[in-house]
Image (cartoon, coloured by chain):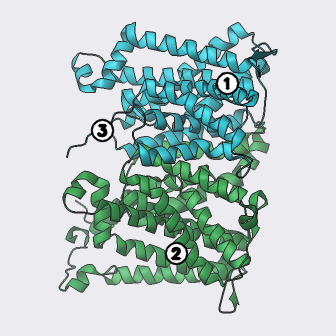
Chain colours: A green, B cyan
């Protein structure tokens, strides 16, 4: 790890060695980022604030998928399904049983984690493509149950979700939701960052690199694969709950297979198996989508393009970007970021 | 009884079309180890292309079908050349994800070029119904089954006797040995993709001549996944046998389970089959269980 440190910085205690923020520059940057984040509602309009909220929620979900796929190597193409489980659990608990939001949030995580464990069970016997297909199956089964369990989920019409509130404080405006979401996102990312350095995190990486070798070394595959499924889907459930309380009305249309694929795209583009990767990936994809939504109607009217342009251009660009990233930069934006940081460290005397 | 016979006939015939599409998957998997998750989108775009040729351009059938086949050939060649070729020997995660990217792209391109959501192909097959025993079946199903069956026979002859077919089987068996014999493996890869696209196109035409072209055609691809999972990823025989089983399960389950459970149970039968197979016999009926060494 010493290679990562700027010249002249030494660790003299274990606590120093393990700290996430090690130098004054780190602390300075961190506090600057914190200040920028917390004052964001002051200078962002409602529209961009809602985009920021969506990005925050998506980061939580992508972080979960990153633990499952990026660290543990278990490809899941059903992430939107697990998010749906969380969203509906929270919606049902707060709407039908009138429980407080926090209970709904925690239960959403646990319910999604439990469903994740059930659909993760095939990972004991299969991997790679087989697992990918069984998670696609999971997605379809979950959505089907949601669409048909009318008495609980409201079926195709969907279910209304009351706004989030903690101890009398109701999160209705975009700005108040922003603080709730930023706090949750920060906790999730911090958790993910630390998880990667624990015994479990190292076991995940060993399983990803070669599960057979990991098992021979004494790593309990059954336990750690299912732990990865639980944690990944727990975060998906938390994200789902926040999403449900943010938009106030959900139905199964919010959780499509295309959504699941986009989550994979996000962690691939950001850099799977890094903490910073999902954040980059989510911001990149969301901004791209916003850009396409803003620009494509204008382009369509200026160049008199056919009617399908607006609908078709989004998936086309996203698909192209997934393919290009895999071919040109399979380690994602996170790798570019590392290169950039390294060159900053040596600046202006890079050899 | 009449009902049962009807369910069995439609199930088996539709299942044979699933087999056809699934064969394309098995081809690519065996020859290059790539899991093609864009299968449904290949079916979708070639159906729309058929619509474009026959209805929008107005070509006669004898000119339209070769055009579709040419399109499928080009599609397979392009996908292999530009998306898969640069990723040879990359981890399976990248190989799966790149096909997802291709799927995304094709789906976007389809809704770009053909913005409407539903269309109907001209009727190729006679409309009169056929009486089999006591059941009344639309002829289209039977024609679809016959065409699928002819293609199975042609394909197996191709793999048994044609030089390229033999080479492809050899590559599936041992890529290194084939390379050592001086046969370019990349050529086999693009051959596999082109064949798979043709199978997807024919499957798509058969499906959409029965049910019309809808976005639901992508689900045909997903059903083909349940066929390959049930039959075993690396088994041609498995795909051929498992297709009718899935079709049968779908039509029987849809027919008899709907009153007992929620409506629309038919849609998820293939997915439930996948989960059950994963637990009981993860490598499928005819698949080869890989023994791994470190």
Quadrant (top left/top right/bottom left/bottom right) for the N terminus of chain A:
bottom left
Image location of residue A195, percent across then percent down: 36, 72
| Chain of the residue under label 1 | B
Label 3 Cα crowd, 10 Å radius (few <14 / some 14-19 / many 20+)? few
Q: Which mark is residue A60?
A: none
Q: Residue B290: which numbered mark, if any?
A: 3
Locate residue A121 relative to residue B136 in the image: left or right. left
Residue ID at (72%, 67%): A152
Residue A188 vertical position relative to residue A206 in the rendered view, above or below = below
Mark 1 and mark 2 in contact (Cβ < 8 Å)?
no
Q: Which residue is mark 2?
A: A185
In percent of width and height, residue B86 lies at 38, 35
Q: Residue lying at the far bottom in this picture: please name it.
A: A167
Residue at screen point 47% across, 25% down: B193
Task: Name the mark on residue B9.
Answer: 1
Q: Indicate whether B168 appears above or below B113.
A: above
User: Which residue is nearer to you in this view: A336 or B212?
Assistant: B212
Nearer to the camera, B16 or A347: B16
Q: Which of the two marks, 1 or 3, is nearer to us in this view?
A: 1
């Amino acid at each position: 790890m010493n290679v990562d440190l700027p010249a002249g910085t030494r660790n003299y205690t274990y606590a120093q060695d393990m700290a996430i923020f090690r130098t004054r520059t780190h602390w300075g940057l961190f506090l600057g980022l914190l200040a920028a984040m917390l004052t964001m509602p002051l200078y962002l309009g409602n529209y961009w604030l809602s985009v920021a909220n969506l990005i925050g929620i998506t980061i939580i979900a992508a972080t979960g998928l990153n633990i499952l796929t990026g660290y543990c190597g278990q490809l899941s193409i059903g992430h939107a399904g697990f998010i749906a489980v969380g969203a509906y659990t929270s919606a049902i608990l707060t709407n039908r049983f009138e429980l407080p939001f926090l209970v709904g949030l925690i239960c959403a995580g646990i319910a999604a984690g439990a469903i994740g464990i059930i659909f993760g069970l095939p990972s004991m016997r299969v991997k790679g493509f087989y697992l990918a297909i069984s998670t696609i199956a999971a997605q379809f089964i979950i959505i089907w149950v949601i669409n048909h369990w009318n008495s609980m989920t409201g079926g195709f019409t969907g279910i209304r979700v009351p706004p989030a509130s903690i101890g009398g404080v109701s999160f209705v405006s975009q700005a108040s939701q922003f603080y709730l979401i930023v706090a949750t996102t920060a906790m999730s990312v911090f958790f993910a960052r630390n998880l990667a350095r624990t015994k479990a995190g190292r076991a995940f990486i060993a399983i990803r690199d070669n599960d057979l070798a990991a098992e021979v070394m004494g790593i309990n595959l059954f336990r750690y694969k299912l732990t990865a499924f639980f944690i990944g889907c727990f975060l998906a459930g938390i994200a789902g709950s926040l999403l449900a309380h943010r938009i106030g009305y959900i139905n199964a249309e919010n959780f499509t297979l295309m959504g699941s694929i986009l989550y994979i795209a996000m962690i691939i583009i950001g850099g799977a198996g890094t903490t910073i990767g999902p954040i980059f990936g989510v911001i990149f994809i969301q901004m791209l989508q916003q850009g396409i939504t803003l620009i494509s109607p204008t382009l369509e009217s200026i160049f008199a393009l056919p009617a399908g342009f607006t609908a078709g251009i989004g998936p086309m660009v996203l698909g192209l970007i997934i393919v290009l990233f895999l071919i040109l930069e399979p380690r994602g934006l996170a790798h570019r970021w590392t290169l950039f940081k390294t060159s900053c460290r040596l600046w202006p005397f890079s050899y | 009884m009449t009902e049962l016979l009807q369910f069995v006939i439609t199930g088996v015939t539709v299942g044979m079309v699933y087999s056809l599409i699934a064969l394309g998957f098995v081809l690519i998997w065996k020859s290059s180890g790539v899991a093609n998750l864009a299968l449904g989108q290949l079916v979708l775009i070639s159906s729309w292309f058929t619509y474009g040729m026959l209805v929008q351009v107005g070509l006669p059938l004898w000119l339209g079908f070769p055009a579709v086949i040419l399109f499928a050939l080009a599609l397979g060649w392009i996908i292999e050349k530009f998306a898969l070729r640069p990723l040879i020997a990359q981890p399976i995660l990248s190989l799966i994800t790149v096909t997802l990217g291709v799927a995304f792209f094709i789906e976007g391109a389809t809704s770009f070029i053909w913005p409407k959501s539903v269309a109907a192909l001209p009727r190729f097959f006679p409309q009169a119904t056929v009486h089999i025993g006591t059941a009344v079946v639309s002829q289209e199903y039977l024609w679809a089954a016959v065409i699928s069956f002819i293609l199975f026979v042609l394909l197996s002859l191709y793999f048994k006797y044609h030089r390229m077919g033999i080479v492809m089987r050899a590559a599936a068996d041992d890529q290194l040995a084939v390379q050592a014999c001086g046969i370019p493996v990349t050529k086999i890869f693009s051959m596999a993709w082109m064949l798979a696209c043709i199978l997807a196109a024919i499957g798509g035409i058969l499906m959409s001549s029965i049910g019309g072209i809808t976005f639901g055609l992508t689900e045909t691809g997903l059903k083909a996944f349940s066929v390959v999972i049930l039959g075993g990823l690396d088994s041609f025989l498995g795909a051929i046998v498992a297709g009718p089983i899935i079709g049968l399960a779908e039509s029987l389950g849809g027919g008899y389970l709907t009153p007992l459970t929620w409506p629309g149970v038919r849609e998820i039968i293939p997915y439930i089959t996948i989960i059950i197979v994963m637990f009981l016999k993860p490598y499928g009926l005819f698949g080869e269980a890989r023994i791994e060494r470190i």
